[in-house]
Image (spheres, grey):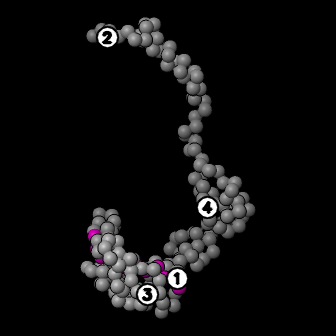
Amino acid sequence: MKARMSFGPDYECKYEWDCFCQAGKSGLVLAGKDTYTTAFFEAFPSKPNCFIRGEGGTVEEAEEQCWQKYQKIRTCNHEMERRGRTDGYGYCKHCSYSAMVFEPLTKCCKCGKLTAYSKDTRGRFYCKTCRRVMPKAVTPRFYLDYKNRIPRRRKKMVKQGASMKLYGGDRYRKVKMKI
């Protein structure tokens, strides 16, 4: 089987992968202040449905690391935990497997059904059927100060009046400043 390379010809895999794979010789890893480049190998198996990444000095080392992770995931007796997530996503305590395995802890604000399908800007959750009534984009309240808002026409008139006063009736006359 061949893995798609970032640049250049495809990479001939050492192991028989039954999924889509991609690899590269210089992948950029952004890990805070520890940013580095490395060779990588990524696999996307369907059973179990997950993403596995291996890193190393060469693509061969990265594939080896990725294969070891895949074998561990396949043979693991997964004991899942939430790790603070409320959307139903869980992580295995023993291997690197993670997936949607739990029921969500959040409820739809309209019908009360357990869901994590969609969330608005105020933090309210909506299920798939109630999502159509979700506000598109709620503008924060501090942007909408209606008491101090000046209508466009009045704002234009105030601006013209100020320029007339500043320029003494003639808009294009230069103002002489007294120092």
Q: Tell me where the magenta segment starts and ends, as one range.
A: 37-48
Q: Position of residue 82 (x, y in %)?
A: 53, 75
Q: CA distance from mark 3 to mark 4?
A: 35 Å
User: Could you say which disc has been placed on residue 46 in the image?
Assistant: 1
Amino acid type, mark 4? Ser
Extreme left residue here? 57
Element assignment for label 2: loop
Quadrant of the rendering where the N terminus is positioned: bottom left
Label located before the other in sequence (1 or 4): 1
Dot placed on the residue nearer the N-terminal end, 3 or 4: 3
At mark 3, the secondary structure is: loop
Whether residue 18 is situated above or below residue 126 in the rendered picture: below
Q: Which residue is mark 2?
A: 177
- Residue at label 3? 17
Q: Foreground mark, 1 or 3?
A: 3
Q: CA distance from mark 2 to mark 3?
A: 80 Å
Amino acid type at circle 2 is Met
**In the rendering, which numbered label is found on residue 125?**
none
Judged by depth in the image, the label closer to the viewer, 2 or 3, is 3
Q: Name the image quarter holding residue 14.
A: bottom left
Residue for point 71% across, 67% down: 113
Q: Quadrant of residue 128?
A: bottom right
Please say if the residues under marks 1 and 3 sit with CB atoms less than 8 Å apart: no
Mark 4 and mark 3 in contact (Cβ < 8 Å)? Answer: no
* Number of numbered callouts drawn: 4
SS label for mark 1: loop
Q: Which residue is mark 4?
A: 118
